[in-house]
Image: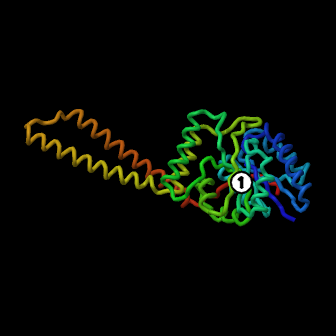
Amino acid sequence: MSLISIVVPCYNEEAVLPFFRDEILKITDGMIEKSPELSFEFLFINDGSADKTLSVLREYGEADERFKYVSFSRNFGKESAIYAGLSNAKGDYVVLMDADLQHPPEIIPEMYKAVVEDDFDCAATRRVSRSGDSKVLSFFSNSFYKINNAISPTSVMSGAQDFRFMKRRMVDAILSMSEYSRFSKGIFAWVGFDTRYIEVKNTPRKAGKTSWNFGKLLSYSIDGFTGFSTAPLRLASFLGILSCIAAVVATVIILIRFIITGETSGGYYTLLCTILLLGGFQLLSIGILGEYLSKTYLETKHRPIYIVKEQKL
């Protein structure tokens, strides 16, 4: 027998959970019919939802022992929910997916084939279409992958999603990285293993509203940059060197002009531009250092990645 754990982070997913349950049971029952040696557990991580998500999960757990849940004491974020789900999954294989059906359950059989029959360690989806998203969001998303892969030794596949079907050994490798500030896309890439990417188009939510916005996505991007690259720190050093060179060149030009023509430069605008330029470089450098320092500060506290209030495993 092979147990497949399906891990589903949830935050205010009350409206979509009934649709998700119907779809996931239809797909998994079909897989069991074709391969009777398979069994499934469905592990939901309630990330401090403010709606009735937990009540719905309790009902599912009472009706079907395969439905399990872990409920946090507050909202810790999706990264913590992913870590909690992988930590509590008991399967020989683990599927990570969202509850909003933007990760289509009908792809799971294809993922299973890639991992079990074609011997990949992981099968993941890669979004090749962002239809339905705003042009601004699409632009920044594409820019993130380009910048990240340019400055980081850990290359992240463009459009890669968290929707993954993984062997136990890959899951254990991910869990061995127990840092507090987590960026799962980078962690998936960093641990390596053979991964097959399945191209999918963007799928709208089945119900409910997304909790992601531009601010959260920007913060998530910064976590990605600082979590797997020291290039921003080098940028701060480069800006400092550039400022010094610019100052020396400007001084030499002013001296040469004074020697040749005897004229002095109008100091007000030159001084203003110089102060603004150097001040901007300094603030940017301090900000970059602050991002790394804040990550180090949080890591040294050794706080738990999540706290469980209630669970049914």
Q: Left or right of 168: which side holds 61?
A: right
In this rendered view, identify the residue nearer to me: 131 or 4.
131
User: For residue 307, what is the image quadrant?
Assistant: bottom right
Q: Is residue 267 above or below residue 293?
A: above
Residue at left 79%, top 45%? Answer: 54
Q: What element carries label 1?
A: strand
Q: Left or right of 257: which side holds 2?
A: right
Residue 42, position as x, y percentages in the image = 82, 53
Which residue is denoted by mark 1 in the rendering?
164
Q: In this view, does 18 lie above or below 233?
A: above
Q: In this view, does 182 lie above or below 208?
A: below
Residue at left 67%, top 59%? Answer: 195
Q: Left or right of 122: which side holds 311?
A: right
In this rendered view, identify the residue nearer to me: 51 or 185.
185
User: For residue 178, what is the image quadrant?
Assistant: bottom right
Name the kind of residue labelled 1 in the image.
Arg
Residue at left 71%, top 47%? Answer: 47
User: For residue 205, what is the image quadrant?
Assistant: top right
